[in-house]
Image (cartoon, rainbow, N blue to C red):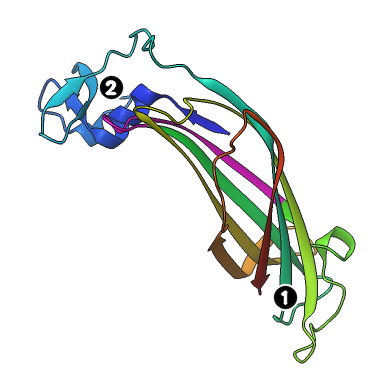
């Protein structure tokens, strides 16, 4: 899970003012340059507003802890011919939750990622070879992502969002080294994703169908 602070995101995505001639994209915390960095954002009128990295939080802004579990249940129609001993199917879900300041566009976001093997079959290896062309096999994945996000809830001046994507991959497994090489993939958005209404939302389930 990756958390980006409002000041850092604002500096990266909306402008980095630097005293000196070095280009903004060349600066980083590990840079050997000694020029002073000024973090901030540029508004719609082209005016740069500096943000203090040590500034106290806005007392008018109240954050809230959102907790729960995202569950993605995937049903895959497997039409690709694969081997029972050297191939496996993997499922990966990626979610991004964010609070966005509507005026400055500064945001805090969390990225969540989890992967699960497809079933049935021992160690996620599909149970028939080759996969019948006239009678595709169905395999399933269940991906569980527990989350804990400290974000500004939606209201005056702030917007929250949640986006989800699913990646499915058939990999070829080297039986000697165990190395996995992707041989077929599928990527798609998870439909119907909305930000949780309650701070403790329990388990939110999404059902996805796909073909490989």
Count of numbered circles on the image: 2
Q: In the rendering, at what x and y percent does residue 160 appear?
A: 46, 36
Q: Is residue 186 left or right of residue 25?
A: right
Camera-side residue of 183 and 67: 67
> In the image as oriented, which residue stretches furthest toward the bottom?
134
Give residue 106's mark: none
Disc nearer the start of the sequence (2/1): 2
User: Which residue is at a point 87% across and 73% down the rendered structure image?
Assistant: 127
Q: In the rendering, at what x and y percent does residue 145 appear?
A: 69, 41
Magenta span contains residue 10: no
Q: In the rendering, at what x and y percent does residue 88 appear?
A: 76, 66
User: Which residue is at a point 36% across and 27% down the rendered structure image?
Assistant: 156
Is label 1 in a helix, a strand or a loop? strand
Q: Which residues are magenta?
A: 101-115
Q: Is residue 84 above or below residue 147?
A: below
Marks 2 & 1, CB-CB < 8 Å contact: no
Q: In the rendering, at what x and y percent does residue 50 appear?
A: 20, 18
Camera-side residue of 45 and 81: 45
């Amino acid at each position: 899970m990756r958390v980006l602070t409002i000041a850092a995101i604002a500096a990266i995505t909306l402008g980095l003012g630097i005293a000196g001639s070095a280009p903004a994209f060349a600066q980083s915390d590990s840079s050997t340059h000694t020029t002073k960095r000024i973090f901030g954002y540029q508004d719609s009128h082209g005016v740069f507003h500096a943000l203090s990295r040590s500034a106290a939080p806005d007392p008018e802004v109240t954050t809230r802890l959102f907790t729960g579990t995202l569950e993605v249940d995937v049903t895959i129609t497997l039409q690709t011919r694969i081997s029972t001993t050297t191939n496996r199917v993997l499922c990966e879900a990626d979610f991004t939750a964010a609070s966005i300041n509507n005026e400055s566009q500064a945001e805090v976001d969390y990225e969540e990622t989890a992967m699960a093997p497809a079933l049935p079959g021992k160690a996620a290896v599909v149970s028939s070879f080759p996969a019948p062309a006239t009678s595709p096999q169905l395999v399933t994945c269940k991906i569980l992502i527990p989350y804990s996000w400290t974000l500004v809830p939606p209201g005056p001046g702030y917007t929250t969002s949640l986006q989800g994507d699913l990646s499915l991959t058939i990999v070829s497994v080297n039986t000697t080294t165990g190395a996995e090489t992707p041989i077929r993939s599928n990527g798609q958005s998870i439909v119907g994703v909305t930000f949780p209404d309650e701070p403790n939302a329990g388990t939110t389930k999404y059902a996805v169908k796909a073909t490989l």
